[in-house]
Amino acid sequence: DIQMTQSPSSVSASIGDRVTITCRASQGISSWLAWYQQKPGKAPKLLIYAAFSLQSGVPSRFSGSGSGTDFTLTISSLQPEDFATYYCQQANSFPYTFGQGTKLEIK
Amino acid sequence: EVQLVESGGGLVQPGGSLRLSCAASGFTFSSYWMSWVRQAPGTGLEWVANIKQDGSEKYYVDSVKGRFTISRDNAKKSLYLQMNSLRAEDTAVYYCARGGYCSGGSCYSINWGPGTLVTVSS
């Protein structure tokens, strides 16, 4: 199985900050990488697919990059509604696997 | 508007069975891969199973193989997860999700239901 490792596990930031979350795959997954946002008590929401493609309706302050084994999610200017937990997921091969999550908190 | 609504969760004893359902609307259900993803309390997400549009291909995480069965009824626009031999570690919120941007069997979960809670406990 492909293991997905996110860092950091948690991060504190302020409104307007730029934040970067990284995700590393244990083997190459080409660009089969998604990023999801989850708020407490809610279902996850797709933000980025195919490593860098922005899902319809997602603000342009979210961006993704990377290929192979190393990927990043960047939020260019944090807004209050962005405080949540973020997960990466590989869809290159079964079983699909998620990273352990990164909790983004208000400083 | 795409809607996915799970049902069938509840409290079940270890070794018991439960059948989850997911009612879909707002899209052509028969045209999409579908998934189940779960989340144990206070933990991260775990993909459980995928099923192809016509049900001809199914994939499972190792921990549920031989115990869980994913199925679908395209006429009823419904996805199912039959869960047998349930264990305490199966306790989780179970989400159904619609697959999108697919290539072969590789898809992303583009829409999610609100989830249904399964608790396995004596």
Image (cartoon, coloured by chain):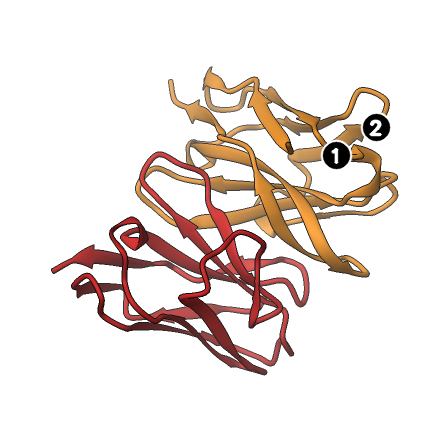
Chain colours: A red, B orange
At x 36% / y 58%, what residue is drawn?
A101
- Amino acid type at circle 2 is Asn
- Amino acid type at circle 1 is Phe
Task: Tell me if residue A101 comes above or below residue B120 in the rendering.
Answer: below
Instruction: Between residue B33 and residue B2, name the one nearer to us.
Output: B2
Chain label for disc 2: B
Instruction: Give the residue at mark 2.
Output: B74
Q: Position of residue A12 (x, y in %)?
A: 17, 63
Task: Tell me if residue A4 comes above or below residue A83 in the rendering.
Answer: below
Mark 2 or mark 1, which is nearer the start of the sequence?
A: 1
Q: Quadrant of the C terminus of chain A?
A: bottom left
Quarter location, residue A33: bottom right
Q: Position of residue B49 (x, y in %)?
A: 65, 44
Q: Residues within 10 Å of mark 2 (few under 14, many from 20)?
A: some
At x 66% / y 67%, what residue is drawn?
A92
> What mark, if any, has residue B27 been given in the picture?
1
At x 27% / y 57%, what residue is drawn?
A79
Q: Secondary structure at mark 2?
A: loop
